[in-house]
Image: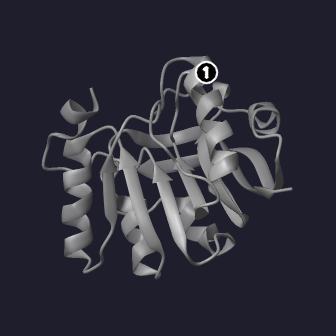
Amino acid sequence: MWDKEYDREEYVYGKLPNDFLKSHYQAIPKGKVLLLAEGEGRNAVFLAKLGYNVTAVDISSVGLKKAEKLAKENDVVIETICADLATFDLGDNKWDGIVSIYCHLPLALRQSLYKRIERAIKPSGVFFLEGYTPEQLNYKTGGPPVASMMITKETLVNELPNLVFSHLETLERVVNEGINHNGLGAVIQAIGKLK
């Protein structure tokens, strides 16, 4: 599905970083950062330009080729890994930051991934997220058409019990990020650290 989605000249989600990441990236300690479901690389390239050591993982080799092209255009280096998040080994105590921007997954996969995220973040590291809440189904301006794949405050607190959130907010905001996220949306934004 995603190879087909990304197989076009245009960058589906644009070349500019996510707005929340752009305005709050300082919360992520400088060092090794993993971006989940990073697709065409806009957020990875943004962080690499700021001096982060960036790894982008995605299931789509087509998207990651575009990410590498975008990195080259911006004269930065990013590591790309083509892998399924269901089986991808995040490692232990490895990342200064893990970034999840609109990474919407089926319930069982998300719960498994969140457990691995808690093990993979360094004690001083940060989990950084923006995603759609179930209310997004009323807007139809992006995201999956399934409420169980959306994210709530309760989801994050219950499925990431070892994190304490310095920022955890649901809001309506205009999301203009490429052709697939365009218009007013219901989002959740979170920044969490290990307890």
On the image, the x and y values in percent for residue 4 come to 19, 31
When the figure is inspected, residue 108 is found, relative to residue 17, above or below; the finding is above
Is 128 positioned to the left or the right of 193 in the image? left
**Quadrant into which the C terminus falls:** bottom right
Vertical placement of residue 78 versus 84, above or below: below
Which residue is disc 1 drawn over? 107
Q: Is residue 170 above or below residue 125?
A: above
Q: Say what amino acid the circle numbered 1 marks.
A: Leu
- Which residue occupies 36% across, 68% down? 45
Q: Position of residue 54 (x, y in %)?
A: 43, 67
| Residue at position x 60%, y 70% in the image | 25
* Left or right, residue 95 beside residue 194: left
Q: Which picture quadrant has residue 123?
A: bottom right
Q: Residue at x 46, y 82 (%)?
A: 51
Q: Is residue 20 visible?
A: no
In depth, the one of 88 and 97 nearer the eye is 88
The image shows a total of numbered marks equal to: 1
Q: Residues within 10 Å of mark 1 (few under 14, many from 20)?
A: some
Farthest residue to the front: give it. 92
Instruction: Give the x, y percent position of residue 57.
Output: 39, 49
Assign the N terminus to one quadrant of the image: top left
Task: Give the colour scheme of this rendering.
Answer: one colour
